[in-house]
Amino acid sequence: MHRCSPSPKESRGRVYLNEFNVLMEGSTYLPFVSGILRAYAEQSEVVRKHYDFAPFLFHTDGLERILAQYENPKVAAFSMLMWNARLSLEVARKVKERYPQCLIVMGGAHVPHDGREFLREHSFVDVTVGGDGEDAFRELLEAYALGGSFEGIPGISWRNDQGKVQRECGERPFRKDLDCYPSPYLTGMFDELLTAHPEIEFQAIIETNRGCPFRCTFCYWGKGGLNRKYRFHSMERVEAELRWMASKGIRYVFNADSNFGVHRRDREIAELLVEIKEKTGFPEKFRTCYGKNTDEKIYEIGSLFHRHGLEKGITISYQSVDLGVQKNIQRDNIKMERAQRLQKKFNEAEVPIYTELILGLPGESYESWISGIEAILESGLKNQIFMYLCQVYPNTELNEPEYRKRFGIKTLEIELTEIHGKVRDRGWVPEVEEIVIETDSLSQEDWKRAYLFSLVTMGMHSLKLGYFVMAYLYERFGIPFTSYLSWIAERNFKEGDYPFIETCLDQLSDKIEEILQGKGRGTVLPDFGGLYWDVEEIFFLQVSRDFDVFYAEMEDLTQNFLESMAVPFDPDELQAVFRFQNLRMPRPGAKNVLPRPGEEEVSQSVLRTQARFEWNFLDYFHALHSNDPIPLRQTEQVIEFSQTNFEGLLPRFAKESILWGRKSGTFLTKAKKVEHEKMDVQPVPGRAKQLLS
């Protein structure tokens, strides 16, 4: 039995706010949810009179180190999300054991809105809060301080004094103005935190509105967390928060809006960001979720951000291009023709774009998955395609038993290894994610095939290992992208002919089997730093150990592929394409094979290599995805390739090429034409493996 109503005569109590954010390499987010809960709660005279707030508990850590910061708590509140769900529960359980009178409150996207079964499963939790938590949390604190009942507080489930679980289903009046909730930044909630932790580079979250008109069945926004009507913070509030972040030197800002760019004022916010960055240098990057029906407003904002170095890539997301799947997930997608026009405009403006697909959505088959990837690649996607495993979250339609049964959805809990997050300490509480591994339309064997194909595609296209070769094969011979990729992924070549490539494919297949055994997606390569890398990134990093061997095998493999399809080709032209492809890949331990006069070979910060080609590759590939493509023709062209000299520092190479460069379009080496009379090196003869050391 839990006693949740202390006497008003009891002394002031301490409130602990727990929001365990992921630790990255020396950085983490300021605890935005905790800050806004506290800022709003402290508007109450009752709360100010009866409570003191302990310092924020704001990042993942060892259980005992977290518990050591507790001292006689009266209330412990948790923002429970996928990456901290089990840790939050374990901390809450231990706190309740040590301090039985402490009120345990659970909120966040991972807590069911109807919390009654959750409370029965977790006897140490006293209250759950569904959806927006500001009003409910303040009212809980007030009632608990005054010894009153929790009845009548909308959106909560709780355990009363008799131990009975109850739920309050009432709704709050709709308030369009979000400024009723004070800003945690402007009220000084984080000032002490910033001062106390100079060793951490804090990132910040801004919220200019709440709401999402879409009801995507896999997304918490659509059904779980947000009203379908929009609510807004004032422009004055948004501007003040952005200026506060800049004044604190916050380099990276994440925007929590569901569909940035759909409102007229979003352009004004974008212009404000540019103005602030020009004056202060901050933020360096602004990451946002763009509107689902991408239109010209997104193009204008994306182009503006790109010109000022603010964007992290512009999203044109489909999740699936299959009409049946879109209907099953209640997804209102941008039309392919419209997306093609926008992509070409972005490409011509050299603005990096990327799209996302989700593997395992209801109704998706192996055939529809492959054809969808082909459609996206043929539409001219120049930069990135990300393919994610379908995850199942609480408070989504995808998680409902009836929905699962309808589509034959089978899932698996696997270890959560936060991609690009710091490697978890062995003593930390392990977390899990739930992924879809089978549906009525996609058997587990087909799921494995589709996942392997996706990893090969992301390695070859998005991480550029075969980007120029694939574009050449498609444009020159009309060969579908997926025909070439399938030939590789399905190993339609003689075993033993390509040991380096086969080893890479073995590693991808082994990783898929590990995932099906419950292992996490993230993989650690110790010599590339103490972070988790995604599966396709491991593919790239392994290839980066010896690009020349990889491309020597790939060239021979491609010749065999073309011969198997009875496609006539020029071997010299194909060899030159592979030379160009090889030279566009950044090297972790690059050496300037052909140093310019007076330049050091290794010590320069930028490495340059010049090479002569007998085809107009630079113009040809640059214009390939524009409205005015240039045909490939034989003409002498000297190209200078340049890249950062990573001096063999593999962690730096991985971080700057993948973390910084993948979405932002700065992944490849730079390439420019050189006038013949300015050329100060001899032509580079021979195969790719003779070109670079």
Image: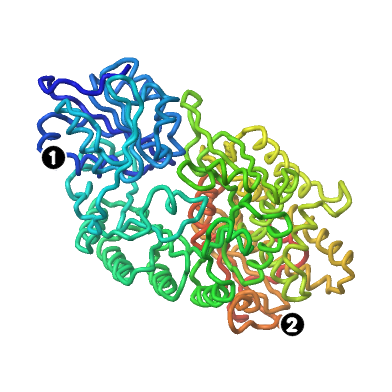
Q: Is residue 624 left or right of residue 234?
A: right
Q: Is residue 535 left or right of residue 686?
A: left
Count residues near mark 1 (Cα–Cα under 10 Å), then give few for <14, some for 14-19, many for 20+.
Answer: some
SS label for mark 2:
strand
Q: Residue at x 51, y 77 (%)?
A: 345
Q: Residue at x 40, y 31 (%)?
A: 116
Q: Looking at the figure, which quarter contains the N terminus?
A: top left
Say which residue label 2 marks. Answer: 634
Say what amino acid the circle numbered 2 marks: Gln
Vertical comparison of 523 with 102: above or below:
below
Residue 44: which disc?
A: 1
* Quarter holding residue 384: bottom right
Distance CA(mark 2)–CA(mark 1)? 76 Å
Give the mark nearest the N terminus, 2 or 1: 1
* Quarter holding residue 256: bottom left
Residue 607: tell me if it is visible. Answer: no
